[in-house]
Amino acid sequence: MDKICREIVNATIKNPSLWLVIDFDDVIMYTSQATRERDEELSVKAGLSKEELLEISKESREENTFGKKTFSISKFSQKIKEKTKNAGLVDEIINNANYAKFINQSIKKLLLAVKSCIEDAKISILTFGEVEFQKLKVSETGIKDFVDEVVYTIGPKKEVVEEKMREYGVKVPFLITIDDSPDNIDDYEKMNIKNYINIRFKHPLAKTYNDPHNAKEVFVGHELSQNQAAVDIWKIIAEKFSVSQPDIAKWEKVIKEAE
């Protein structure tokens, strides 16, 4: 199995001044919240306790060839079917989840602001996990319309970023990473990159919310207001790339009012 899979959405930007690398789960999409709602529905309709579902979820995580544990939605589904006689119901709940309703609208507006105000910015989603399941979630949210590429990986994100930065050679862009995982935040700090901002996006319902990061040079957006966190990030990017004050104010209002 290859470590990464790339989906190029827009190939026109060859030498970006800004490369924005953003996580998907619990940043663009409220995955932890979606998972809770899915499991609550499975608990009620499939007759499984929350404790049983938690145990099945743990059993559905396995270490891959790169030493990283990934959640297998197919394994999860199969194990639930083994415990319930209604396989069709299980498929319906898992395959017909409305992932679009869990998209973070303020982050979507942030990406639109970056594309609108920084002409040669490149935006990449970098997401870790079972590729088939990640592709399903990304596709269902419709977020690909707002980015230049989606990179799926089952290996360390840091290695993906470093490899691409080496490809840029002497024309290295300013790098900004946005992630919710403390482990990824700490890994990113180890990169030997001068023009770089490491941003942790925290969502109160995310399973990693209370987990600390050890990295020193990390910007953490507003923890209780997702819209304000996105505004904070927008201001950092806009000021770094000399976006006009009217445009900063315009997009700040759009992001803050996102629903």
Image (spheres, grey):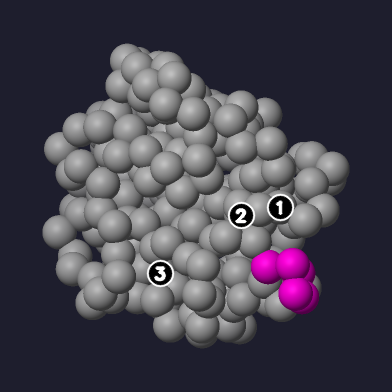
Q: Depth check: 73 or 193 in front?
A: 193
Q: Depth check: 97 or 77 in front?
A: 97
Residue drawn at (84%, 43%), measured in percent from left and top?
Answer: 12
Which numbered dot is residue 184?
Answer: 3
The x, y position of residue 106, in whole percent, is 39, 27
Where is residue 66, by image quadrant? bottom right
Query: On the rendered structure, is 102 left or right of 9?
Result: left
**Amino acid type at mark 3:** Asn
Mark 1 lies on a secondary structure that is loop
Up the image or down, 153 lies above or below 8; here it is below
Residue drawn at (66%, 53%), measured in percent from left and top?
Answer: 17
Where is residue 44, by image quadrant? top left
Which numbered dot is residue 16?
Answer: 1
Q: In this view of the protein, can residue 150 be seen by the observer?
A: no
Mark 3 lies on a secondary structure that is helix
Q: Depth check: 58 or 33 in front?
A: 33
The stretch in magenta equals 168-172
Report which residue position mark 2 lands on.
19
Query: On the rendered structure, is 86 left or right of 159?
Result: left
Mark 2 lies on a secondary structure that is strand
The residues tagged by marks 1 and 2 sit, at their Cα atoms, a distance apart of 6 Å
The residues tagged by marks 3 and 2 sit, at their Cα atoms, a distance apart of 17 Å
Q: Is residue 180 one of those drawn in magenta?
A: no
Dominant secondary structure (helix, strand or loop) of the stretch shown in magenta: loop
Up the image or down, 204 lies above or below 18; here it is above
Labels 3 & 2 near each other (Cβ < 8 A): no
Labels 1 & 2 near each other (Cβ < 8 A): yes
Up the image or down, 252 lies above or below 203; here it is above
Location of the C terminus by quadrant is: top left
The x, y position of residue 178, in whole percent, is 43, 54
**Amino acid type at mark 2:** Trp
Q: Is residue 169 one of those drawn in magenta?
A: yes
